[in-house]
C-alpha cells in the first residue's frame, strides 16, 4: 500500500544552462563564412535547443511501490537502511568508497545524496547512491512506503 509518493526532477544548474547559452557566439562565428542569415538563425536556435533538451531530459526520482531513479527500478521491499549524505562522507562515497556493485545516479552540481542498501539476496546490487536536493523527504517517502 502506497502511503506517500515522491517525485523530483533533477534539473540542471543555472550555471550549466548559462554555459549552454554561451554557445551562441561560437555558432555565429563558425557559420558566418557560410551565410550570415543562417548563422544568426542557428546561433539563436542551437543554444535554445540544447537548453530545452537538457531540461526535458533531466533524470527523475519517483517513489511509489518501487523507487525509480532514471533507468534504475527497484521494489521497495528489496531495500534496507537509508542514509543521508553530504559533505566529506558524500565525496568519499561517490569517489574512492564507491562499490563496483552499486547502482547510482550522481549529479556533480547537487550537494546531497542518499545511500540505500539493497537487501534482496537475488539482486547483485549492493546499494543505490542517489543525488537529490531533498534527501530527508526522499528518505521519508522510502521508509513510509516500505512499511
Image (spheres, helix red, strand yellow):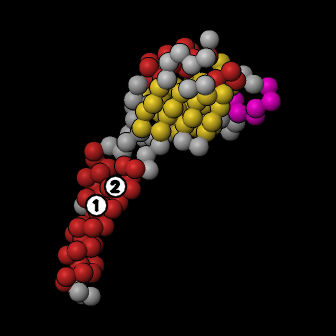
Of all residues, the one furthest to the top in this rendering is 147
Which labelled disc corresponds to residue 48?
A: 1
Q: Secondary structure at mark 1?
A: helix
Residue at 24% across, 81% down: 38
Q: Is residue 137 left or right of residue 121?
A: left
Chief secondary structure of the magenta span?
loop
Where residue 117 sits, quadrant-wise, is top right
Residue 22's x, y, as percent? 24, 61
Q: Is residue 111 left or right of residue 114?
A: left
State the quadrant of the N terminus: top right
The local crowd at label 2, few if under 14, some if 14 to 19, many if 20 or more residues have their Cα within 10 Å, is: few
**x 19%, y 82%: residue:** 37
Q: 71 or 65, which is in the foreground?
A: 65
Q: Which residues are magenta?
A: 121-127
Q: Is residue 83 above or below residue 42?
A: above
Q: Give left or right: position of 11 versus 61.
A: left
Q: Is residue 35 magenta?
A: no
* Mark number, residue 52: 2
Quarter of the image with the C terminus in it = top right
Neighbour class for label 1 at 10 Å: few (<14), some, many (≥20)?
A: some
| Contact check, label 1 and label 2, Cβ < 8 Å | yes
Q: Is residue 122 magenta?
A: yes
98 or 7: which is nearer to us? 7
Q: Is residue 21 above or below residue 35?
A: above
Distance Cα–Cα, label 1 vs label 2: 6 Å
Q: Is residue 125 left or right of residue 51?
A: right
Q: Position of residue 131 (x, y in %)?
A: 47, 33
Amino acid at each position: 500500500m502506497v502511503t506517500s509518493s515522491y517525485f523530483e526532477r533533477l534539473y540542471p544548474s543555472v550555471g550549466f544552462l548559462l554555459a549552454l547559452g554561451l554557445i551562441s557566439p561560437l555558432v555565429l562565428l563558425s557559420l558566418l563564412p557560410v551565410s550570415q542569415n543562417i548563422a544568426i538563425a542557428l546561433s539563436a536556435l542551437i543554444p535554445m535547443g540544447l537548453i530545452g533538451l537538457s531540461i526535458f531530459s533531466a533524470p527523475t526520482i519517483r517513489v511509489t511501490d518501487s523507487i525509480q531513479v532514471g533507468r534504475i527500478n527497484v521494489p521497495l521491499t528489496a531495500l534496507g537502511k537509508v542514509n543521508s549524505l553530504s559533505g566529506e562522507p558524500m565525496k568519499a562515497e561517490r569517489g574512492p568508497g564507491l562499490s563496483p556493485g552499486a547502482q547510482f545516479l550522481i549529479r556533480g552540481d547537487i550537494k546531497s545524496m542518499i545511500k540505500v542498501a539493497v537487501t534482496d539476496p537475488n539482486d547483485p546490487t549492493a546499494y543505490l547512491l542517489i543525488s537529490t536536493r531533498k534527501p530527508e523527504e526522499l528518505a521519508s517517502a522510502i521508509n513510509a512506503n516500505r512499511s
